[in-house]
Image (spheres, rainbow, N blue to C red):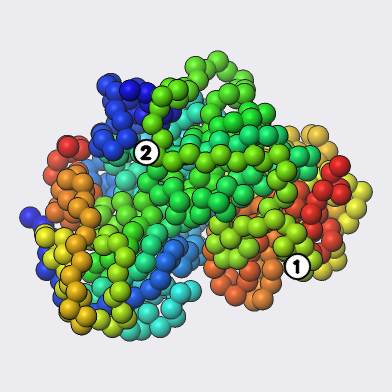
Amino acid sequence: MSSINTIIEAKAHVYGDHIDTDRIIPGKYTKTLDLSTLANHVLEDLDPNFNKIVQKGDILIAGINFGCGSSREQAPLALKQSGISVVIAEDFARIFFRNAINIGLPVLEIGKHTIQKGAKIAVNLKEGTVTDITANKIYTATKLPDIMIAILNEGGLVPYLNKNGNYTL
Amino acid sequence: MGQTISEKIISNHVGHKVYAGELVISNVDGAMASDTTGPLTIKAFKEMGGKKVFNPDKCALIIDHAAPSPNERIANLHKMMRDFAKEQGMRLFEIGEGICHQVMVENQYVKPGDIFIGADSHTPTYGALNAFACGVGSTDLAAVMMTGKIWLKVPQTIKVHCSGKLKDGVTAKDLILFLVGKITVSGATYQAIEFCGEAFEGLSLASRMTIANMSSEMGAKTGIVHPAGLELDYDFSAITPDEDAKYIKTFDFDVSDLEPQVSAPESPDNVHNISNYEGTKVDYAFIGTCCNGRLEDLDIAAKILKGKKIHPDVRLIIAPASQSVLLDAMSNGTMATLIESGASLITSGCGPCVGTHQGVPADGEVVISAANRNFRGRMGNPNSNIYLGAPATVAASALEGKIINPKKYLI
């Protein structure tokens, strides 16, 4: 069954709008299959400190159009490898969104929010809710299409296809 | 009910009429990955149980993002791609053969009416050909190569109608920069764009590729240029939208007075008339990429630089979009003109645009580039600034050492 935790409670790292994939992982580091190289440089042109302060299970929060730019799957891979357990944004660029689900990194789209840096956040993936414990505020995420839920429940597209051999709606 | 171009193409591939919002599993005509996305694709393909790619004649790998390999790590990834292509009986486009999108079009891997999936965000470039082309990441692409299918939501379509003809000295790049500025980097997320109207009808295939290419800079799933005026060297049946097709939004611009456009750091939609930036000192000029590395782009640069020398404080790098473009530019004299002016020629490929090698700017330097992205750090140095413009703007700016309207050299 699922390799994804459905209940997550962790600290939020909060960034702004239009965080592009060059800022998530610069192109010069993408040509590798070594995930630790990706994690070592994640978000370095946005926040050189991120890599030092991120802890396993932490939550990344952003504004609109998170992950715009290139198709590099290294972007969600770098975030996942760095310890990020879920990415929450007002909305996402489409390729990043698919890539994240495909590699088993949960992503939630919650629209306009006021979550502050360092806030304690609880996420219920099954219910699709995000609770800002610090500010005592609950957000409801846009529901994923069923096929994405199925892919995420298997832990990503590789285990999904390993099990099913093909797509089913 | 009427259909958009995207709805028609997807309907043709799923065997019944579909409309925006429906989730489908569609057959795919072709697929490709580059050396940024290919190695992860191969890894995922094997892990998901892939044995044979669905159609070796329509699947390809292209070594273009870091070609030739700048270090042993990337050399080994390239070898992994060569070995996989050989094992699968599919073509690998070698270093120097060209940029993925250019070689896919030149070698007819994609044709009008096709659904083509590429592991590169600029895959919508094939919308120039009246195809539905979509960028994905490595694992999605591995699944396409294994199953010959993709799941997707039929997109809503934004209609972008441009009336009027572009003035002399104003090109497709200026037009698409203008549109990116208006529609913004997230203005078409998840949606398809249809470009139509007089301004597009007279455009060459190369110019249409420039237009469709930057659909991805608006977040679009695909961007298709209306086939009116499209000329190809083979027969094709064009797919046009129904008159009563439903659009989520319609833009209407008269572009007959459009001036050259420049996108300033550090987002492609930070676009203004060139007059706002004229006089900005530049250190480095670059013409190439899947957006603007084709023959007409090199030709217009050569027209500006013929018999002249670029500014002594500027370096000009040229990366033709493919070997075929390079050969054409050699035989028509363009390449000699560019090199005599002081330009440096590098291997056909993505080169400096992705910041891996072949021309990383120094701290504090200003680049004027014919590419499609100017995000912070894009060219490999977060402390440099990238301005985007048309090839003519880049060539004129290289000549004068500052951003300049190329008009006086072209009219």
Identify the image quadrant of residue A51: bottom left
Residue located at (28% from left, 66% from top)? A88
Q: Secondary structure at mark 1?
A: loop
> Where does the N terminus of chain B fall, quadrant-wise?
top left
The crowding category of the residue bearing disc 2, from other C-alpha atoms within 10 Å (few below 14, some 14 to 19, many at least 20), is many
Q: Secondary structure at mark 2?
A: loop
Let me know if residue B209 appears in the view: no
Q: Give the image location of residue B112, x and y in percent.
A: 49, 25
Which amino acid type is marked by label 2?
Gln
Which amino acid type is marked by label 1?
Thr
Q: Residue furthest right?
A: B307
Q: Which residue is mark 1?
A: B280
Asked if residue B348 is positioned above or below residue A41 in the image, the reply reads: above
> Where does the C terminus of chain B fall, quadrant-wise?
top right
Question: N-terminal of the two: label 1 or label 2?
Answer: 2
Q: Which mark is residue B156?
A: 2
